[in-house]
Amino acid sequence: MRCPHCGNFDDKVIESRTLANGDSIRRRRECNGCGRRFTSYERIEDKPLMVIKRDGRREPFDRGKIERGVTRALEKRPVSSMSIENLVNEIEDQAADTGKENYEIAASRVGDLVLKKLADLDKVAYVRFASVYRHFEDLDEFVREIQKVGGTPKKREVKNGRSKKLD
């Protein structure tokens, strides 16, 4: 380590401490040239996970985007913020595991992970997210998705502007 005071590369470590839950190390050093002390920090530098978009562009994985999309899909649904946080953590962990070999994951794979988790958590949120993610164009696409997730839309009879379920 180069001394910030005299530029000498000869120093000795006097003390080392682990910081931030073991993610970094603080080292107190003394320069053998000028005798002055200074502090250095070491931390592991991870290569960021990159998301490959449909058009081939690559951008860093953004947990915030997933959190915003999931929160929007679960808006006005009886799901706690802790459940949302856990869901986003699970998606982030699975994305990291999937892309750990080459630090890349397809955006479609991330979307599929989100859909799978939402299907287990809340069917309405699943359909909401799927409608945006898969760019639904008409009602038939909604019906197919609802049938795929396990629900069957019931027929409704309309009388005097009011709808009534048919059994």
Image: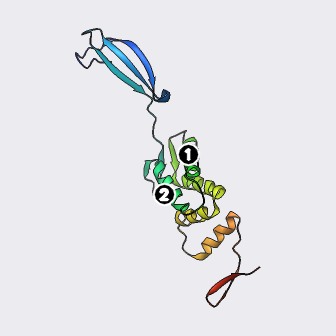
Residue 66 placement, left or right of 35: right
Q: Residue at x 55, y 52 (%)?
A: 81
Using the rendered view, name the quadrant where residue 126 is placed.
Answer: bottom right
Disc 1 is placed on an element classified as helix
Q: Nearer the viewer, mark 1 or mark 2?
A: 1
Which is nearer the eye, 14 or 99? 14
Q: Residue at x 45, y 54 (%)?
A: 56
User: Eyeballing the image, is 155 above or below 114?
Assistant: below
Residue indicated by mark 2: 54
Could you tell me residue 97's position as x and y percent?
58, 41
> Few, some or many C-alpha atoms within 10 Å of disc 2 (few <14, some 14-19, many ≥20)?
few
Q: Report the amino acid beneath label 1.
A: Asn
Name the residue nearer the viewer: 147 or 30.
30
Image x and y of residue 146, in percent? 66, 68
Which amino acid is tagged 2? Answer: Arg
Q: Residue furthest right?
A: 167
Residue 101 falls in image quadrant = top right
Residue 69 coordinates in the image, percent (x, y): 50, 58
Where is residue 109 drawn, in percent x and y? 56, 52
Residue drawn at x 71%, y 71% as measured from the top left = 152
Q: Secondary structure at mark 2?
A: loop
Which numbered disc covers residue 63?
none
Which residue is disc 1 drawn over?
A: 89
Reply above or below: 25 against 119: above
User: Can you tell which quarter of the image residue 164 is in?
Assistant: bottom right
Q: Earlier in the sequence, mark 1 or mark 2?
A: 2
